[in-house]
Image (spheres, rainbow, N blue to C red):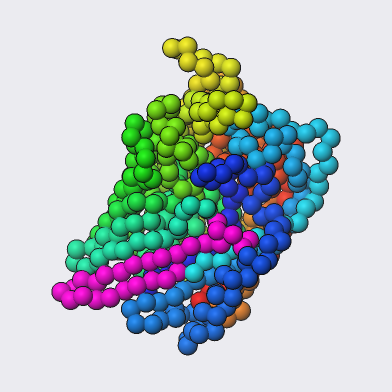
Amino acid sequence: MPNPFSLSTPARRPHRQPGQAQRSGQPEGHLNHDTAALRAPLLATALAALLASTPAQAVEFGPFSLTGFAKLELTRTTNVCEDCQRELGEARHRRWADDIVLGKPFGTRDSHVTLVQPYLGFKQKIGGGWEAFGLLSQRWRDGKVDLKGWVFERNVGLAHEDYGRLTLGAMTTRGWSVPDFPYSFKAISSDFWGGGSGSTPAWSDAGAGYGLLSRAARYMTRPVEMLGGDVLFEATYDISKKGWKRNRPQFLELYAKYIGRELLVDVVVQSSKNGEPVAWGKAPFGGLTPFPEDDPLLGGSSQGMALVMVRHVIDGKLELSGGLRFNRWSGAYAVQTTTGPLGRWNNMFNVDWGGVDANGVPNPGYAARSTDFMLGTRYRINDKLTAGLGLTYLGKASTDNPSERGQSNTLLVGTGSVGYTVNSYLQLSASASVYEFGRKGQAPLSIPAHNAFTNIDSRVAKRGNSIGVSANFTF
């Protein structure tokens, strides 16, 4: 059965959910007291674990199997300014989201987040080397559906030992799973981000990629022997939500993986048109806005990214990791889609507010490119204990926008962590991180919100640090 857990620290959701107003400007890890809503998925996970006959294995019943995880994370961060943005809940690229409340106190704050995600899988041999499979999964964050209107996994497919694997439906992208932990398929997993790796969501959740697909087709080849190891190739295409005629969403992802004895190399390339302009690598791929009726009023936009990640193991204990990511955005003009003082606006990107383009169209959005990288190391002290260090750098963006929208800023994140495996079900970890923006002001363009990943608003403080502990329960 596939082992499709995703245990990374989540980033804040900067975009509006379909049919809803934007959420408040609190970071993702803010305290949520909705324990009643959380109780049901937690009990379901606990019950499934109790039914498991062997540690860390799926609960199996006929061709079906149930796996999953539950995670609790507690964090203390310095230089946090709660509700400092004057217009709470507005996304960073809107001009009226620029202002902050002067004199607002800020300092050390505590936060916590819980994640629960079960996976119901299906697998059945049907003869002739063929196998049918399916996967259904949803995630709850602090007791509520993580992304309202979206399902993490809802797909079916066919696999053949010679012809490869075809999957249809809703699924996560490799742009999500490659920098996250662990991969969607155990057969190609590569424990980049186990306990004590020094990982950070500033790497896994940033950039110009997308993470969730709704109407996708994915084909993976069987492993091919090459260069002393095995190589997998994969292509994924998605047409997203219905209702868009003029600006039809289109998404293409190409993926290649080299699996050697002590070397793993992953390459992911995404190219998309007419999705919601974002700088959040786990964003759902939908239309230009959550409302297809906006279609005739908008011009198209595009974005894409190319990602390379490498892991090298030395003597079975020391692991060295590195990653390089190139981001590209076309920009998106600011357009009011409904009239009135409370009228809706589109999801714009990198706008020169008050400016005009060569044709006199106001509030143009400008193209931008940026480069990010990460370095990491992990040392296995013994079978239970690991320690790691990680460094992530989100770079400046190149753009012709005459207005400063964050293209001149950078973010450097250094993280040290330790992980301890209690048993096959439970893993504990602790981490300490330092954050350094290149300047005080708008956050780098490859960040979805000014306080994303750090809980520190770059318009209020240039630097800060955090400590955190987490517990991951898997079955």
Residue appearing at x 63%, y 65% in the figure:
37
Residue 130 magenta-drawn? yes
Residue 153 magenta-drawn? no
Residue appearing at x 55%, y 75% in the figure:
44
- Residue 105 in view (yes/no): yes
Percent coordinates x, y for residue 331 in the rendering: 47, 29
Percent coordinates x, y for residue 410 in the rendering: 61, 37
Image quadrant containing the N terminus: bottom left
Q: Residue furthest front?
A: 340
Magenta region, mostly helix, strand or loop?
strand
Magenta highlight range: 119-146
Residue appearing at x 34%, y 56% in the figure:
169
Position of 209 with respect to 87 (left or right) is left
Percent coordinates x, y for residue 97 in the rendering: 66, 32
Q: Which image quadrant is residue 186 in?
A: bottom left
Question: Observer-nearest residue: 217 or 456?
Answer: 217
Percent coordinates x, y for residue 432 in the rendering: 69, 58
Determine whether 69 is above or below 424 in the image.
above
Position of 173 with respect to 201 (left or right) is left
Position of 256 with respect to 444 (left or right) is left
Residue appearing at x 45%, y 69% in the figure:
119
